[in-house]
Amino acid sequence: KNEVEQSPQNLTAQEGEFITINCSYSVGISALHWLQQHPGGGIVSLFMLSSGKKKHGRLIATINIQEKHSSLHITASHPRDSAVYICAAQGNTGNQFYFGTGTSLTVIP
Amino acid sequence: ETGVTQTPRHLVMGMTNKKSLKCEQHLGHNAMYWYKQSAKKPLELMFVYSLEERVENNSVPSRFSPECPNSSHLFLHLHTLQPEDSALYLCASSQRGGPHTGELFFGEGSRLTVL
């Protein structure tokens, strides 16, 4: 069993819809990361959070430390949001990262 | 542009070849990583160089050999690979210590195909 589980694995949405991607983890963490990977491979860090909530444009990330759960929300989704979104738990030592398998999002115009 | 550059972007090699992947970061970070990404699997950590310390995943075969000559450059030397080693190899860097400790910056990846 992977230390980080994401759901759903695949998600198709109509442009403008509100999207939620969930992440559960089973290890002790110093931080939780949300990453975005576009076709072609490059990965970009969206959020790094250890408590509460962060917002960047149309993206919002939340974390509940007690429940070991994090969510990534996208408001007013757009086709350019189509990508794979990866949740990563950073272990307490700092060097160790545990990655989810990713959620593949397709936003249809 | 993330500040982490990987070359080559694509590499095709035979099982008897020796090749190297290169990564360079222009962010002043003090930790660099090699990850392997296979289809439908989580990113797999291969090696970490952090604060002059090397950490490796013990499951990585010896046909993969990392080299970190300085804090800005990281290589992955490839020797007698197997077809199952075909994957996307991602380099990342981060800053250990300070307010942004741990935030990863990834390169575009090197797509490796072993024939």
Image (cartoon, rainbow, N blue to C red):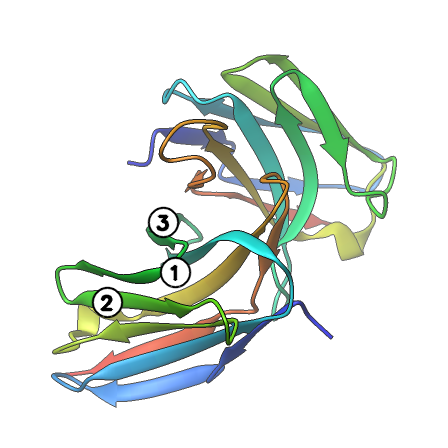
Q: Give the image location of residue A11, x and y in percent.
A: 37, 85
Q: Are marks 3 and 2 on the same chain?
A: yes
Q: Amino acid at mark 1?
A: Pro
Q: Earlier in the sequence, mark 3 or mark 2?
A: 3
At 56% from the left and 55% from the top, the residue drawn is A29
Could you tell me if the residues under marks 2 and 1 are in contact, i.e. CB atoms within 8 Å? Answer: no
Residue beneath label 3, please? Answer: A45
Q: Secondary structure at mark 3?
A: strand
Q: Secondary structure at mark 1?
A: loop
Q: Are marks 2 and 1 on the same chain?
A: yes
Which image quarter holds the N terminus of chain A?
bottom right
Q: Give the image location of residue B15, x and y in percent.
A: 83, 42
Q: Amino acid at mark 3?
A: Ser
Q: Are marks 3 and 1 on the same chain?
A: yes
The quadrant holding residue B32 is top right
Above or below: residue B30 compared with residue B110? above
Q: Chain of mark 2?
A: A
Real-space CA distance between mark 3 and mark 2, rounded to the nearest whole angstrom = 13 Å
Q: Amino acid at mark 2?
A: Ile
Q: Nearer the viewer, residue A79 or A73?
A: A73
Real-space CA distance between mark 2 and mark 1, rounded to the nearest whole angstrom = 22 Å
At 56% from the left and 69% from the top, the residue drawn is A101
Above or below: residue B24 compared with residue B94? above
Real-space CA distance between mark 3 and mark 1, rounded to the nearest whole angstrom = 15 Å
Q: Residues within 10 Å of mark 1 (few under 14, many from 20)?
A: few
Q: Secondary structure at mark 2?
A: strand
Residue beneath label 2, please? Answer: A60
Between disc 3 and disc 2, the foreground one is: 2
At 44% from the left and 35% from the top, the residue drawn is B101
Q: Nearer the viewer, residue B9 or A7?
A: A7
Residue beneath label 1, please? Answer: A39
Residue B115, can we see it?
A: no
